[in-house]
Amino acid sequence: MKINIKPLSVNQAWKGRRFKTDKYKAFERELMLKLGKLEIPEGKLLLTATFGLSSKNADWDNPIKPFQDCLQKKYGFNDRHIYKGVIDKVDVKKGEEFIEFTLSKLI
């Protein structure tokens, strides 16, 4: 089904300035330390990610933007170059949460 409507960005969905929570700041610090070396290809990118979530009530798309923003901060690229995403949500036990990802050139 195709619907002719301009998609709404996260920035357009909220009024006023948003501030990072302490939880987000802690997540960002920990993730930055755990992310290894990665070569970011030139051109359009494909983000493939699996989020292991312990809450069955968690929406599959909620962790995407904070994670993606951390990736661009760590690796020095602009996430506007991500043209495609393949995202999976996996149920895991509390304490076994994870993020697995690849960032590759979109062919």
Image (cartoon, rainbow, N blue to C red):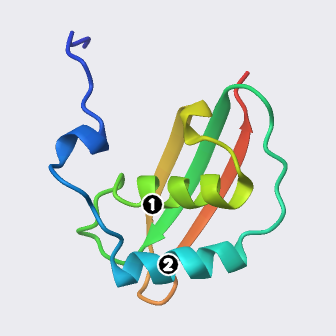
In-image side of 79 versus 42 (left or right): left
Question: Residue at 24% across / 31% down in the picture?
Answer: 8
Where does the C terminus fall, quadrant-wise? top right
Badge 1 amino acid: Pro
* Discs 1, 2 touching: Cβ within 8 Å: yes
Dot 1 surroundings within 10 Å: few (below 14), some, or many (20 or more)? few
Residue 22 is situated, as x and y percent measured from the top left of the image, at: 37, 84
11 and 47: which is toward the camera: 11
Q: Which disc number belongs to residue 90?
A: none
106 and 92: which is toward the camera: 106
Label 1: state its secondary structure.
helix
| Gap in angstroms between the C-alphas marked 1 and 2 | 9 Å
Q: Which disc number belongs to residue 66?
A: 1
67 and 49: which is toward the camera: 67
- Give the labeled residue for mark 2: 27
In-image side of 29 versus 105 (left or right): left
Question: Residue at 31% across / 68% down in the picture?
Answer: 19
Label 2: state its secondary structure.
helix
Where does the N terminus fall, quadrant-wise? top left
Residue 99 is situated, as x and y percent measured from the top left of the image, at: 57, 67
**Which of the 4 image quadrants contains residue 57?**
bottom left
Residue 100 is situated, as x and y percent measured from the top left of the image, at: 63, 62
Residue situated furthest front in the rendering: 17
107 relative to 94, above or below: above
In-image side of 63 versus 97 (left or right): left
Question: Residue at 28% across / 66% down in the picture?
Answer: 58
